[in-house]
Image (cartoon, rainbow, N blue to C red):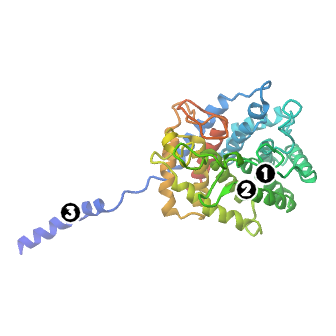
Amino acid sequence: MKMFTKFVIVLFLFLPAAAQAVNPPCRTFPPAKSEVKALMDKVAGWQTGNFTYSTTHNSHDNGIDSWTNATLYTGISEWAKISGDSVLYQWLINIGDTNTWAMPSNFARYPKYQLYHADELCMGQFYLRMFDVYGEQKMLRAVKERVEWIMTHPGDTTMNISNKQSWTWCDALFMASPVYAHLAKIETDNKYLCFMDREFKRTWSFLYDKENKLFFRDSSYFGKKEANGKKIFWGRGNGWVAAALVNLLKLLPGDSVYKPFYDDLFREFVPRLAELQNPDGFWHASLLDPENYPFPETSATALIAYALAYGINQELLDKEEYLPVLEKTWRALVSAVNEDGKLGWVQPIGADPQKVTADMTAHYGVGAFLLAGSEIYRMQH
């Protein structure tokens, strides 16, 4: 009897340790809000403190109202909305005031970047976000004028990359479509959604490879192959589309007749991207040939992370299945931020997979990072 009693006592003392051993450790993701905020503030602070733009050279890519900078402003405005950071809001107001809240118009010098060009609409996303906060007509006026002009002056509908009057490259879906959706919300007028939906679906039907469930960057890649013989699907190009879907779904009313298409595309396309994540947590410049592009690429990774986090938050993606993917993604992105807050491993401006190095950064990459971090921050209620 004494032997049995000793056995029971030993077993009782052992059980807590045994239970601890078999139970999985508590999840550390999503990270604490304080941890995310500290990193986001550091990245935003470094970028605003090291912000430059050109007044003399290639304003389409480098000007104050370029798509590259507009993507940054969009990311900063998303983070400012969450954090309530008055310093960031003042920085954004200074940008808008410096540019007199105007849309890009330097077309005499760069004639192919016309009023129709989707990249030239990206600045509108920033202005409309600021209008939501401050309600000042100067933040709305130029965007509405540009969009109204495009809608009443139908452009060339040829789906060839040389034609910039239509959305002939997949990046355009991020640059332009949310502007129309946002105007529809502000003006409570579905004519903007009707136009956007038609143009989006023309691009989708032309560039979406239904077999691979990925987007070609543009028609010039239809017949091209990577070194491994597979089709060329650019990481950031597909990231642009994933982020475009998020920005659209945030703006479309729940009962919109247009919404089911974008919900369905999101549920098909974003999980396919998740399948192509590399073991290091990043997506690389070429989605189907990472061996020849072995280095991380943070702009694609951040844009896809933004979509994954939004999909989980809105229950478009199964949390149990995709939270581990997002956790690996976020850890990878965090590793690309140096001690000062500079984000590295960003592929330079381009239209195809390119080599990347750790010291490469770009404003649009930081904008994408801030969008992703903002959505991850929302995971902690």
Q: Residue 225: percent from the left, percent from the top?
A: 59, 46
| Secondary structure beneath label 3 | helix
Quadrant where the C terminus sits is bottom right
Nearest to N terminus: mark 2 or mark 3: 3
Q: Are marks 2 and 1 in contact (CB under 8 Å)?
A: yes
| Secondary structure beneath label 1 | loop
Closer to the camera in the image, 45 or 200: 200
Q: Residue at x 56, y 40 (%)?
A: 297
Q: Which residue is mark 1?
A: 159
Nearest to N terminus: mark 1 or mark 3: 3
Question: Would you place residue 310 above or below residue 134 in this image?
Answer: below
Nearest to N terminus: mark 2 or mark 1: 1
Question: Would you place residue 155 above or below residue 211 in this image?
Answer: above
Task: State how many labels appear.
Answer: 3
Q: What residue type is disc 3 on? A: Phe
Quadrant where the N terminus sits is bottom left
Q: What residue type is disc 2 on? A: Phe
Q: CA distance from mark 2 to mark 3?
A: 64 Å
Mark 1, other Cα within 10 Å: few <14 / some 14–19 / many ≥20: some
The numbered disc on residue 206 is 2
User: Which one is closest to the eye, mark 1 or mark 3?
Assistant: 1
Q: Residue at x 73, y 56 (%)?
A: 206
